[in-house]
Amino acid sequence: MSSNDIQTPLRKSPPANLKFKAMVALAIAIGVVAWGLTSRMKDKTALENVKQEQAIPTVSVVQPALRQDAQVLTLPGNLQAYYSATVYARVNGYLKHWLVDIGDKVKAGQQMADIETPELDQQLKQSEANLDTAIANVKLTEITSARWQNLLTSDSVSQQEADEKKGDFEAKQALVAAAKADVERLRALESFKRITAPFDGVVTERKTDIGALINAGHDAGHELFTVADVHKLRLYVDVPQNYANQIHMGMKAQFDVPEHPGQTFTAVLSNNSRSVNESSGTVLIQLDVDNADRKLMPGGYGSVHFDLPRDTQSVQIPASALKFQKNGLTVATLTSDNRVAYRTIQISRDLGATVEIATGLSVNDRIIDNPPDFLEEGDKVNVGGQPETRSTGENK
């Protein structure tokens, strides 16, 4: 045995199972760390997703609706007598007496009042006297002219003198004609002492009384009576310009008046002004109303209902969906991926809780009801529930 073998101690290698255990422990530690990191990443991602979901607003969605029934346009109307005349005096004087009062029915030509005209009476007497004088003068000149014509045949007078007598006779005839015309003029004025009804109707105003001073004419005096023909009435309605083309001649309308609650009356459109009033933006139309039973009164007002054909191009949405922006009136619609897209619209009718849209929308659009102010173009939103279709009833 060598000395080297004696001096070097024997070295033992570690057992194999110890290495294996160390490797397993290391793997477990690495797994625990990896699991912890992964769990934290998942929690962080989930938290971010929750934050993002909470940041996306949830909105209520409605869809435009088409009217299935006819549109009813309701407008105020004013009733007027078919004929109405204000009666003035044509002669000066004093009212002797009146024979009719407000509410009385009168016939055409019926006497309504008498006027005392002392000055006119004297003028007529003077004119008649002038006529008598002119007639006497013309008779004298006629005899004189005939005599001078006979003397002319015997050359007792000259032709000049005979012609002068004949000319004087013709002048006196002209004076008679003038005197007759003056008498007829004054007699015509005398007939106006009787105030008569211009047509069949009802006395709606009396603005005079016994002993009142009467001045002739419109400018100098004031009206005495007002007579209205109410067997038929005219109903005037101001129609907004955007409905003017839907109102046509001969169409019927229903209306009601406050003094007959629960009753409706029929009117037929007879005239259209074909002109837009600049101050109101409306077109004046006239409807005729049969009033043979005298139920309706001129000067009254009523609510007129027109049945208009449904506009297949327009849709209705709740007024709460409207939003005013710098570019005008808009609504917030949703794209297929639930992003906000604003559309500019034009309203054709404001019905209160709902509005009728002329352009900019279709029945397939999804509209945000009560859109929040912070919503901007392209924002992502969540839809709460199913889109609601707002049905529309009859407009009043």
Image (cartoon, rainbow, N blue to C red):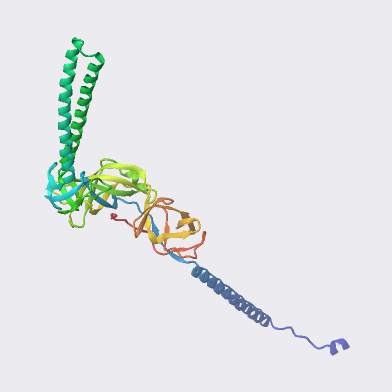
Can I make out residue 46 in this image? yes
Q: Quadrant of the N terminus?
A: bottom right
The residue sitting at 14% across, 32% down in the picture is 132
Viewer-proximal residue, 162 or 106? 162
Across and down, in percent, residue 116 comes to 15, 47
* Horizontal arrangement in the rendering, residue 293 relative to residue 336 (left or right): left
Viewer-proximal residue, 223 or 102? 223
* Horizontal arrangement in the rendering, residue 328 relative to residue 355 (left or right): right
Viewer-proximal residue, 216 or 274? 216
The residue sitting at 27% across, 45% down in the picture is 286
The residue sitting at 16% across, 17% down in the picture is 147
Residue farthest to the bottom, as pictured: 7
How many marks the image carries: the answer is 0
Across and down, in percent, residue 108 comes to 14, 41
* Horizontal arrangement in the rendering, residue 45 relative to residue 69 (left or right): right
Across and down, in percent, residue 28 comes to 61, 79
Q: Quadrant of the C terminus?
A: bottom left
The residue sitting at 32% across, 51% down in the picture is 67
